[in-house]
Amino acid sequence: MIRLEQLTKRFPGQEESAVEELTMDIPRGEIVILVGPSGCGKTTTMKLINRLIEPSSGRIVLDGEDVTRADPDKLRRRIGYVIQQVGLFPHQTIFDNVATVPRLLRWPDERIRKRVEELIEVVGLDPSRYAQRYPKELSGGQRQRIGVARALAADPPIMLMDEPFGAVDPITRERLQNEFLRLQ
């Protein structure tokens, strides 16, 4: 379960808080969608949950652990995160991008290979054609799909998604959404 307690984020030089005293519970296995206009704090809230930015005040509790005091790198290995801008490593192949977190978790090579190939297929690409390519060799929609695959790679118990399907075609979007529902 994720619990946000009076979570606030104020950026220096800004009069208003990006997030103001947000309190909410997200039960395990639930899909929660943050909806609101641009600038209302949706992305900031997700960045706070996985500690890409630090809260000004309040607490973030994951499964009973106050993660505002946890090692942020270890925390992020437990959270899949997909952003609209994708965030793939340009100097790494598609295979290496998807394999990033499983390698950090020291999975055996064969398990990594199988998982990466499986996920490249899940997002509608052929591993034999795409695994050794680099992000610059893919379309925007293909890069976005690989970003989703990377977020799923280590079977994280938590997935944070910030407009992950904006650059994918409607058929692929539906397939990815159905895969998330299946995984849930």
Image (cartoon, helix red, strand yellow):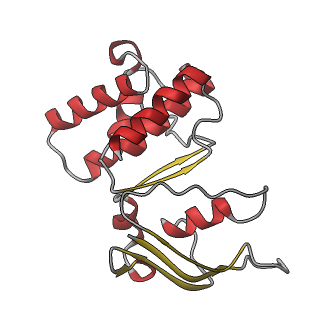
Q: Give the side of residue 30 with respect to residue 116, left or right.
A: right
At a point 52% along the width and 57% down the height, the residue shown is 32
Q: Residue at x 52, y 23 (%)?
A: 172
Vertical order, 13 against 143 (above or below): below
Image quarter of residue 97: top left
Residue 36 vs residue 96, the one in the foreground: 36
Question: Is residue 100 shown above or below 105?
Answer: above
- Residue 181: tell me if it is visible: yes
- Percent x, y for residue 35? 68, 56
Query: How many numbered marks does the figure carry?
Result: 0
Residue sitting at x 50%, y 31%: 145
Q: Is residue 97 visible?
A: no
- Residue at 56% from the left image edge and 69% from the top image edge: 48
Q: Is residue 71 toward the left or the right of residue 26 in the image?
A: left
The x, y position of residue 110, in whole percent, is: 14, 33
Q: Which image quadrant: the N terminus? A: bottom left
Query: Which quadrant of the structure image shows residue 56?
Result: bottom right
Please identify the residue farthest to the right as the structure is shown: 15
Report the side of 169 relative to 40 (left or right).
Answer: left
Locate residue 159, reporting x and y percent.
Answer: 44, 53
Residue 134 locus on image (x, y percent): 48, 25
